[in-house]
Image: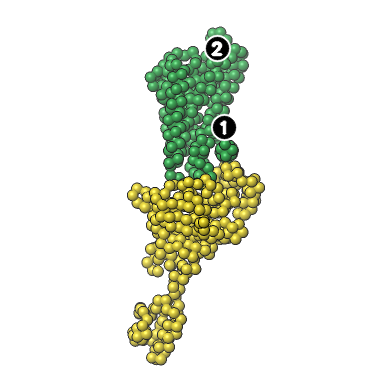
Chain colours: A yellow, B green
């Protein structure tokens, strides 16, 4: 038995000799919210298009619900709701008619339309042509269409793209409820870690088509180690004291920085400094933010 | 089959409340006005009716019908090209083949609507002019044959419309290739093989006009139509199935 809802093995897509996606091994567990991260152009959308069978991989395989995408595409798609890039809609139709057009294809019960409109909070606007909707409303309609078929897996490509902060918050709350209330597994892509860190259980980070990190968000947070910064009366002498203790310290002007030391080592260090009559003015802990770490991983942040 | 009917129902819903329906009666209405207002026709009542039909069919099929065919083909793809609709649609549990069939079905449905309204327009004109000897054996094959002859062009235009995300580009080319029709239909050699001229030839093939492409046997014409239909339809389908969405 396969425990993964989505599992890809060596998934690659080549365009004109250049790999847009290369050797991707994604694993997404049931009931999880998986944040699929990476800068624009890293290959997120290409990957999602392969997950939905819209394009064929150059090599590698996609298994969803334990079934091979190449062989059982329609059976897999029946249990997936998706929103790829921009929400697509028929502007001259109302929200209810847009959903009806999809409902006719997937043969969902008619009552489901009002249910999903209710879930995304569009019930009042359901009878208006969609072309008059705000971007946030269109995005919510996109999520409503994705939910229409009672999916077991939701694949959302940048669902908060172009939304204002309150729109982002709205969508985030909506997505957080999916596993809890409906038992749905969610894959959500974004180019901002901050957007998914509050809802994702696991994150996968792609850079130039390669998966460079895939683990729980807690483990990512642990990687965001803290450092201790000291300000003392005589930094040069203090540095020697720290070297004697065997600590790897770096001096920058009047500041001394120590990376990732344990509580015990920190206590020992302070004791040593005080017994040698150093005056310790400041001891600060500096935490690297997740965003810094993310930027470091995707290779954009020079300051991290 | 049930799934295909549902897909068709969904496609029909998308076209509802769009101006496409206004295009269906345009050519029949124009023809009705021209037919009613045109000069007295000479000859016996039966001959008059045949000339009436032929002149209306010529006006209808030379320009308007091929252009409408292109418009319909472009229109059924229009909403998908706007804003990633292909992705959303093909991420649903439907095969590309059935979607392609559904799109084509819709175009042929619109075209048969046009043809039936055209037939109605001829009948009304005949009645207004006090003609009663309806030449069914001329008109029925003409109207239905005209419809069949539109299908290769519809398949070709659907292919172009799927491939081109622009709404206007395939239409412009369609109009440009429709314009030489008046010349092409006079050629017995090339006329039958020119997809834009085929509707005209088919609608008048059994008529009284025996010049140019109209002299060829009906059988040959329909073999050409079926042949080119298969080429364009299968070509478009293969293209669509391999297309990266």
Q: Residue furthest top?
A: B44
Location of residue B208 with respect to A165 vertically, above or below: above
Q: Residue at x 43, y 57 (%)?
A: A25
User: Residue B213: which disc?
Assistant: none
Residue position marked by numbered label 2 in the rendering = B48
Q: Nearer the viewer, residue A137 or A220?
A: A220
Image mark 2: chain: B
How far across and down, in percent of the image, does residue A154 sit?
54, 54
Q: Residue furthest front?
A: A1
- How packed mark 1 is, by other alpha carbons closer than 10 Å (few <14, some 14-19, many 20 or more), is few
Secondary structure category for the residue under label 2: helix
How far across and down, in percent of the image, does residue B92 sit?
53, 46
Does the rendering let one see residue A134?
no
Q: Nearer the viewer, residue B20 or A142?
A: A142
Residue position marked by numbered label 1 in the rendering = B22
Location of residue B109 with respect to B121 vertically, above or below: below
Q: Residue at x 46, y 25 (%)?
A: B226
Secondary structure category for the residue under label 1: helix
């Amino acid at each position: 038995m396969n425990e993964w809802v989505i599992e890809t093995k060596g998934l690659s897509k080549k365009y004109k000799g250049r790999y847009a996606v290369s050797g991707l091994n994604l694993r997404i567990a049931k009931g999880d919210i998986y944040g699929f991260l990476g800068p624009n152009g890293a290959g997120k959308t290409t990957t999602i298009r392969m997950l939905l069978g819209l394009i064929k991989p150059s090599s590698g395989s996609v298994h969803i619900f334990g079934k091979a995408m190449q062989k059982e595409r329609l059976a897999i798609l029946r249990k997936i709701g998706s929103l790829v890039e921009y929400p697509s809609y028929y502007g001259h139709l109302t929200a209810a008619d847009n959903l009806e057009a999809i409902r006719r294809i997937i043969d969902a019960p008619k009552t489901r339309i009002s249910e999903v409109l209710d879930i995304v909070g569009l019930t009042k606007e359901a009878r208006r042509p969609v072309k008059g909707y705000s971007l946030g409303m269109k995005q919510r309609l996109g999520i409503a269409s994705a939910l229409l078929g009672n999916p077991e897996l939701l694949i959302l490509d940048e669902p908060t793209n172009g939304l204002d902060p309150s729109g982002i918050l709205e969508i985030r709350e909506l997505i957080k409820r999916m596993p809890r209330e409906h038992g749905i597994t969610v894959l959500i892509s974004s180019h901002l870690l901050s957007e998914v860190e509050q809802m994702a259980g696991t994150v996968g980070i792609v850079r130039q088509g390669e998966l460079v990190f895939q683990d729980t968000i807690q483990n990512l947070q642990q990687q965001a180690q803290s450092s201790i910064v000291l300000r003392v009366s005589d930094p040069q002498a203090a540095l020697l004291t720290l070297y004697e203790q065997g600590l790897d310290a770096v001096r920058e002007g009047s500041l001394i920085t120590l990376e990732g030391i344990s509580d015990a080592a920190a206590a020992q260090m302070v004791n040593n400094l005080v017994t040698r009559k150093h005056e310790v003015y400041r001891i600060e802990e500096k935490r690297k933010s997740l965003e810094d770490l993310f930027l470091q991983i995707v290779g954009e942040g020079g300051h991290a | 089959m049930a799934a295909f009917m549902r897909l068709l129902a969904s496609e029909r819903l998308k076209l509802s409340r769009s101006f496409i329906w206004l295009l269906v009666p345009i050519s029949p209405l124009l023809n009705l006005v021209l037919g009613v207002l045109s000069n007295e026709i000479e000859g016996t009542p039966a001959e008059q009716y045949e000339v009436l039909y032929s002149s209306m069919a010529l006006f209808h099929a030379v320009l308007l019908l091929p252009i409408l065919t292109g418009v319909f083909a472009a229109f059924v793809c229009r909403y998908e090209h706007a804003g990633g609709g292909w992705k959303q649609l093909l991420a649903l549990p439907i095969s590309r083949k059935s979607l392609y069939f559904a799109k084509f079905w819709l175009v042929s449905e619109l075209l048969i609507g046009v043809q039936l309204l055209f037939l109605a327009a001829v009948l009304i004109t005949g009645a207004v002019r006090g003609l009663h000897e309806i030449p069914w054996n001329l008109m029925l094959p003409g109207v239905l044959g005209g419809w069949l002859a539109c299908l290769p062009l519809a398949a070709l235009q659907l292919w172009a419309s799927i491939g081109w995300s622009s709404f206007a580009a395939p239409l412009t080319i369609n109009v440009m290739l429709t314009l030489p029709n008046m010349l092409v239909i006079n050629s017995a050699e090339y006329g039958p093989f020119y997809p834009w001229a085929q509707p005209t030839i088919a609608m008048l093939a059994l008529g009284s006009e025996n010049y140019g492409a109209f002299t060829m046997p009906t059988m040959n014409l329909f073999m050409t139509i079926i042949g080119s239909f298969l080429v364009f339809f299968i070509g478009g389908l293969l293209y669509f199935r391999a297309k990266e969405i």
